[in-house]
Amino acid sequence: MRYSQYFVPTVKETPSDAEVISHQLMLRAGMIRKLAAGIYNYLPLGLRSIRKVEAIVREEMNRAGAIEILMPSVQPAELWQESKRWEKYGKELLRFKDRKDAEFCLGPTHEEVVTDIVRREVKSYRQMPLNLYQIQTKFRDEIRPRFGLMRGREFIMKDAYSFDVDSSAADSSYDRMYQAYRRIFQRCGLNFRAVEADTGSIGGAFSHEFMVLADSGEDAIVSCSTCEYAANVEKAEARPVAPEHAEPRSLERVETPQKRSVEEVTAFLGIPASSLIKTLLVVADGEPLAVLVRGDHDLNEIKLAKVLGCEALEMASEEIVEKVTGAPVGFAGPVGLKVRIVADLATQGMRNFVTGANARDLHYKNVNFDRDFAPERFADIRNVVHGDPCPRCPAGHLELWRGIEVGHVFKLGTKYSEALRATYLDAEGKEQTIFMGCYGIGIGRTVAACIEQNHDADGIVFPIPIAPFHCIVSAVNAKDASVMTAAEGLYRTLTDAGVEVLFDDRDERPGSKFKDADLIGIPLRLVVGSKNLAEGKVELKIRKSGEVSLLPLDEAVEQVKSLVAAALNQ
């Protein structure tokens, strides 16, 4: 492809409404342009990268035994009403009526539609396992679309759905997808973690998120320094802390004037935060209760909701706190409370700790379990922290990362098949409910996440497998016939060898050409200049490392071919 005949509308200035680096660089590099809030045009460079990701996804899905279909983006309300998600999904579901007043929505996902296909067509256990997938445009009416392709309203997604005869078979399908996803993101050249995750609004038995590691990531995740354990913070397990060995001391009520926060109380009493227990008041399904976590730990509301088995959970208001404890916020404590108490596992072994005294400006010292109060139960209800011991192996510790979710796999079980009555006849002729899984990858989001992970001060640094082009050939002086002839020869030779080349044949200053090449992130650059060409050489620059070498033309061609082949065949 010749640059002079291509459409690459790069810009020098960073757009004012672009907040994250991927959004900034995709706009500056001429990859996307905004049409409306959260809705983008994909320009040639952006589309090429998106098609690269799609190709990798399609190859690995087919390799894993999935079968491609295409479902409509417009979905009838009846299916969503059957699954009970028509109202539950919320305002992100864009609903509308056709000219006959029939209700429809723009599909944010396709569990209902694909389950409807299978319940109509699959009748016997002999027709499973079955895995159907598509690559298609979705729409979710986000209240605050932002960050370009990272959180758009319209987006390209690969979604797959597995159908099995029982839970064990569904586990096998899940594992095939899990392994396929690992291969997909490895082939894209991304540094990622597969983390245990909460199933959220999709529901189901268990799930994994695939997170691209990036400092700008919205999600906090942890992974073990030794084994393969990884999870998002909402899901990460905390190993119980070893008990303290100390004789109980006498309970002591102490004045703590105007000292409410953990930092204020511990500094005033001269103790570490780990020697204090916070008493947090929450309201679970309308019932107030107290939750205890160590002073240096944070409550994990998702874990707590699961422990309590409640539908609605929120922090108690100041009015409720004062009504339950008899004291303002900041002085709550478990001693003498008349509500249910749930304590985090990390508090279980503590001795002689500090708590609020349920009175203004007062705290208790030397509080002990059983003697002074007894929780209803101990449970893992806190966020893990950096350095916590791994819950799965004896030697590892947890490390904190920031991640961008690009893929998610769920074991759904029978949630949708029961709601839509998707059944089959087993070997004995008995009707059974189908077990399902679902598996999604954000295609455009994967490209954006790649840029968040791979960039520098000059622009994008694409991995070869999903770069718009593998190599750019830059002719330094377009008016020099020998330079243009040599550059043209490199372009044709590499193209004939299967290397995707952008030939910068523009009559522009060399500095301008180099800046554009760095901005759009082409991994390899061959620079043809009259001085080096006089010695029969060209300059090869590797974008990621910045390594520059002078090579004879034939050797430069072989080096580029070798680097591309190595990256594509990993």
Image: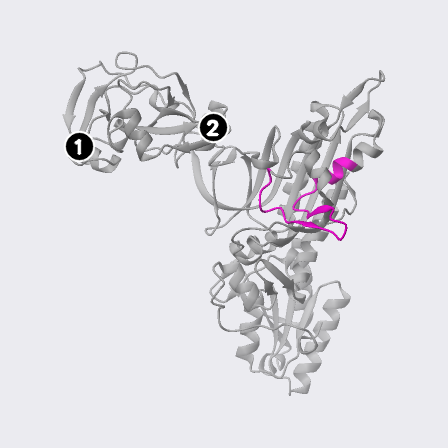
Magenta highlight on residue 113: yes
Cβ–Cβ under 8 Å for marks 1 and 2: no
Q: Where's residue 501, x and y in %?
A: 69, 68
Circle 1 SS class: loop
**Does residue 424 lie above or below 318 as drawn?**
above
Query: Which label belongs to residue 270?
Result: 1
What amino acid type is highlighted by mark number 1? Gly
Which is nearer the eye, 545 or 244? 244
Residue type at numbered disc 2: Ala
Question: In the depicted view, which residue is nearer to us: 443 or 413?
Answer: 413
Q: Between 360 and 115, which is closer to the camera in this rendering?
A: 360
Disc 1 vs disc 2: which is toward the camera?
2
The quarter in which the N terminus is drawn is bottom right
Please state if 558 lies on the left or on the right of 335 as rendered: right
Q: Which mark is residue 305?
A: 2
Q: Taking 240 as reference, is 172 left or right?
A: right
In magenta, the rendered stretch is: 88-116
Query: How far across and down, in percent of the image, does residue 375 sit?
Result: 35, 17
90 relative to 51 in the view: left or right: left
Give above or below for 482 relative to 46.
Answer: below
The picture quadrant where one finds residue 288 is top left
The structure's colour scheme is one colour
Judged from this view, the residue extending furthest toward the top is 371
Question: Percent from the top left, x then y, of residue 56?
Answer: 70, 50
User: Which label is found at residue 190?
Assistant: none
Separation of marks 1 and 2 at Cα, in angstroms: 34 Å
Whether residue 294 is visible, yes or no, is no
Nearer to us in this view, 536 or 218:
218
Q: Is residue 321 above or below residue 245?
A: below
Classed neighbour count for the residue bearing mark 1: other residues with Cα under 10 Å, few (<14), some (14–19), many (≥20): few
Secondary element at image label 2? helix
